[in-house]
Amino acid sequence: MPRAGLSTAAVVDHALDLIDAQGAEALTLAAVAAKAGVATPSLYKHVSGGLAELRRLVAVRTTDDLTERLAAAVLGRSREAAVAALLTAYAGYADEFPRRYAALPQAPDPDPELSAAGGRLVEVLFAVLRGYGLAGSEAVHAARTLRATAHGYASLATAGAFQLAEGRDVTLERLTEVLVAGLAHWPS
Amino acid sequence: MPRAGLSTAAVVDHALDLIDAQGAEALTLAAVAAKAGVATPSLYKHVSGGLAELRRLVAVRTTDDLTERLAAAVLGRSREAAVAALLTAYAGYADEFPRRYAALPQAPDPDPELSAAGGRLVEVLFAVLRGYGLAGSEAVHAARTLRATAHGYASLATAGAFQLAEGRDVTLERLTEVLVAGLAHWPS
DNA sequence: GGCTAAGGCTATTAGCCTTAGCTTTATGGC
DNA sequence: GCCATAAAGCTAAGGCTAATAGCCTTAGCC
């Protein structure tokens, strides 16, 4: 029995493929093992915590991917342009990988690694807010506002909540305008 | 074997109890049956679609409960007061039943009944927007903005994403102010 | 050449969902 | 008051999954 040459990262790759193709429900150790050409228990050599840890790893990977995109999008921009680019990139990621994004909240509850990934994402938001001269507690509230807005839109969009004929793009534009205006006249 | 006097609604009640107490992961037909004092297969008499349908029913019930709260909160208010009351009520519901709210996106994907429940919720938002003279397509975009904001905040709050020391209440205040201002000067 | 560690495997257990078919209870009409 | 029938429960069984235990083999290094 030749080695399959698996690794933790490769297992996560297969997991993401499964989720993207069939949704979070389809993420099962048996399915991942089949994709990897390996027996189910062998996965425990790379993902010792079993299914729960795999879900956690998927969430961390997704969050980090998203963070990278956001960082690239805001690079070299500031204020309105940065906020607009951020929201566009955020929504774009969710649009490109809807099932993956929808699977994010499936991760086990309070996890240090996932929190750290969230922290890295928030750092990008803080960087954008620096252009508005926001710091300290108000920057925290503004960052939460930014994140809540982006996540709320992405979450509803991927969940198929926007069923009326009106284009989602326009909604995102309006949302962006409201947010930009709100940051420009931040209440404090 | 005396009758347990079960009904679809009672099954959903038990499901909600389980979710509230132990999270969405704990929602299993076996556990519901145990709570109801019934053998597992008996549940199929009331929830013919099995676990998937139960999850769907839970989501519908939760959405309707939330809608009722929102409707009560905005009753007799308009404009800023209505928006503030709406967001407070929305966040309050998620805060009171965090696991139930977090379980919402677990429902099977495109479902007519759940869509209808979502539609009823959106009707409340439209009612609030009437105070702003918004109608037609712009009202749709504004309603989505409203919903995305409320859901984004609630979703992140229940997921434990707000870990810094700053109070969530203040964040919600800021979010409300931004939204109120955005609606007052709606871009169109 | 041999040792060690890592990466596979099979076998097994336990828990769950689901279907099928039987039995009992309650109810409504006569 | 009795009986037919539908609803509501049951047991039994099948199939899927995660997870653990214990074994075997490969790869690499001393």
Image (cartoon, coloured by chain):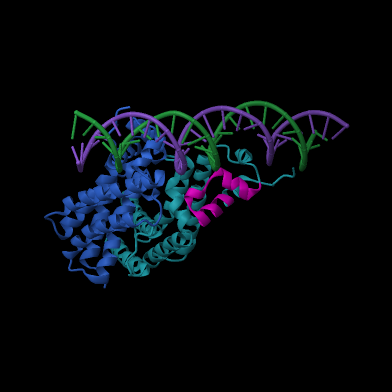
Chain colours: A cyan, B blue, C purple, D green
- Give the quarter of the image for residue B177: bottom left
Q: Residue visible at 25% across and 57% down?
A: B120
A31 shown above or below A179: above
Find residue B30 and report its horizontal and vertical position in percent. Answer: 41, 34
Relative horizontal placement of residue C4, taking residue B112 as reference (left or right): right
Find out whether residue A30 is within the magenta segment: yes
- Give the quarter of the image for residue B145: bottom left
Find residue D12 and report its horizontal and vertical position in percent. Answer: 49, 30
Residue A50: in sight, yes or no? Answer: no
Residue reaching furthest to the left = B76
Give the magenta-colored segment's residue range.
Answer: A14-37
Q: Residue visible at 14% across and 59% down?
A: B78
Magenta portion: prevailing SS class: helix
Nearest to the observer: residue B16 or residue A188: B16
The count of marks equals 0
Find out whether residue A156 is within the magenta segment: no
Residue A7: in sight, yes or no? Answer: yes
Quadrant where the image shows the N terminus of chain B: top left
Residue reaching furthest to the bottom = B188
Q: Residue visible at 21% across and 50% down?
A: B68
Q: Residue visible at 51% across and 49% down?
A: A26
Quadrant where the image shows the C terminus of chain B: bottom left
Find residue B80 and report its horizontal and vertical position in percent. Answer: 17, 58
Nearest to the observer: residue B151 or residue A126: B151
Find residue B185 and report its horizontal and vertical position in percent. Answer: 22, 68
